[in-house]
Amino acid sequence: MPFGETLPSDLRNRTQRRGPRMNSRVPVTIEWTGSGGPLRFEAGFTRVVNTYGCLLVSPREISLREQIRLTNLVNRKMADAVVVWQGLKRPDGWDLGVALVSTDLSFWGVDL
């Protein structure tokens, strides 16, 4: 399957990002249930953030479209999100594209 065909059409056809991005390593806690199993917690971090989401590094693979909750460990704010892209596993973890469900401009603790 060609790259991007598994993405929703509004994401596939988008020519621009919705906002500025910033390289920023923000430590987070990731919570999710997986396929109906027990609640899981993992420590992760971001590589890139923007108002609408981030490039997240997770020690565990998390399924596409999985609903997760992120806690920013710097300012203790929480946000619900969904995994919209899965990258490759690198030595420090899985690269995941995450979209925040609601936008809190201060969630990342940086000016975007």
Image (spheres, rainbow, N blue to C red):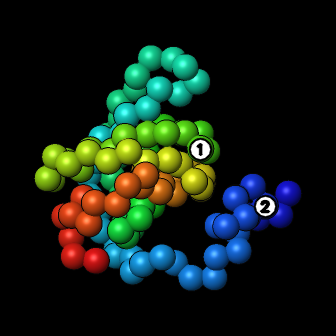
Residue drawn at (43%, 40%) of the image: 68
Q: Which mark is residue 8?
A: none
Would residue 37 appear left or right of 111 to someone viewing this image? Answer: right
Q: Nearer the viewer, residue 82 or 27?
A: 82
Q: Is residue 10 in view from this perspective?
A: yes
Local packing at callout 2 (Cα closer than 10 Å; few below 14, some 14-19, many 20+) is few
Local packing at callout 1 (Cα closer than 10 Å; few below 14, some 14-19, many 20+) is some
Q: Can you name the residue that lies furthest to the left here?
A: 75
Secondary element at image label 1: loop
**The N terminus - image quarter:** bottom right
Q: Can you name the residue that lies furthest to the right here?
A: 1
- Rendered location of residue 69, percent (x, y): 37, 40
Residue drawn at (59%, 39%) of the image: 63
Q: Nearer the viewer, residue 46 or 36?
A: 36
* Residue beneath disc 1: 65
Q: Mark 1 to mark 2: distance in Å?
A: 15 Å
- Rendered location of residue 73, percent (x, y): 19, 47
> Picture quarter containing residue 112?
bottom left
* Residue beneath disc 2: 5
Q: Is residue 90 in view from this perspective?
A: no
- Rendered location of residue 57, percent (x, y): 43, 52
Secondary element at image label 2: loop
User: Does the CB distance between marks 1 and 2 fall below 8 Å?
Assistant: no
Residue drawn at (70%, 59%) of the image: 8
Q: Earlier in the sequence, mark 1 or mark 2?
A: 2
Would residue 1 appear left or right of 84 to someone viewing this image? Answer: right
At label 2, the amino acid type is Glu
At label 1, the amino acid type is Arg
> Picture quarter containing residue 61?
top right
- Rendered location of residue 103, percent (x, y): 34, 60
